[in-house]
Amino acid sequence: MRIGDKDKAVLNLLRENARATTTELASKLGLSRSTVQKRLERLEDTGVIEGYTVQLSSAYMDQEIKAHVSITVEPRMTNEIITVMTKMQGVRAIYSVSGPYDLICEVAALSVRELDAVIDDIIEITGVERTVSSVILSTRLKR
């Protein structure tokens, strides 16, 4: 889907604050509230905007211990493994990647013990052949 500059501006403002009202967006963009509302509805209807979410504060997120888990899977088992991982507490994201691994999973927990348990649970999934974990020490940039 192609979107124009005004739609991009709406999306950028929503990235900064997904709770902004249409009136606030309209004021910042120099558009009428009804124009912004129609743009939002069109972006939602066409699937550009799939939903709105909560962005947790850095103070809260700093409590979590996060890791990237690189995963090698048995051939043709990827979908089943992803289905199982999707239901696991602590799994934040799953990426299909090229290279020596098949998947990279981002996991988070409030203690090293919990993080270790999540990684152990991933290793136990039928079809997972190998994992390599890297604990994230700090986030230098997130957009």
Image (tube, grey):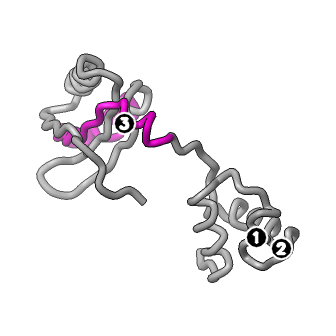
Q: Amino acid at mark 3?
A: Asp
Question: Is 119 one of the magenta-colored residues?
Answer: no
- Please state which of residues 122 and 141 is positioned toward the viewer in this rendering: 141
Which residue is at a point 31% across and 40% down the rendered structure image? 106
Q: CA distance from mark 1 to mark 3?
A: 36 Å
Q: Are marks 1 and 3 in contact (CB under 8 Å)?
A: no
**Which span is picked out in magenta?**
57-84
**Which element is circle 2 on?**
helix
For disc 2, the marked residue is 35
**Quarter of the image where the C terminus is located:** bottom left
Residue 135 image point, x, y percent = 20, 37
Q: Quadrant of residue 109?
A: top left
Which residue is at a point 69% across and 66% down the rendered structure image? 43
For disc 3, the marked residue is 62
64 on left or right of 35? left
Dot 3 or dot 2: first in sequence order is: 2
Q: Amino acid at mark 2?
A: Thr
63 on left or right of 123? right
Q: Amino acid at mark 1?
A: Arg
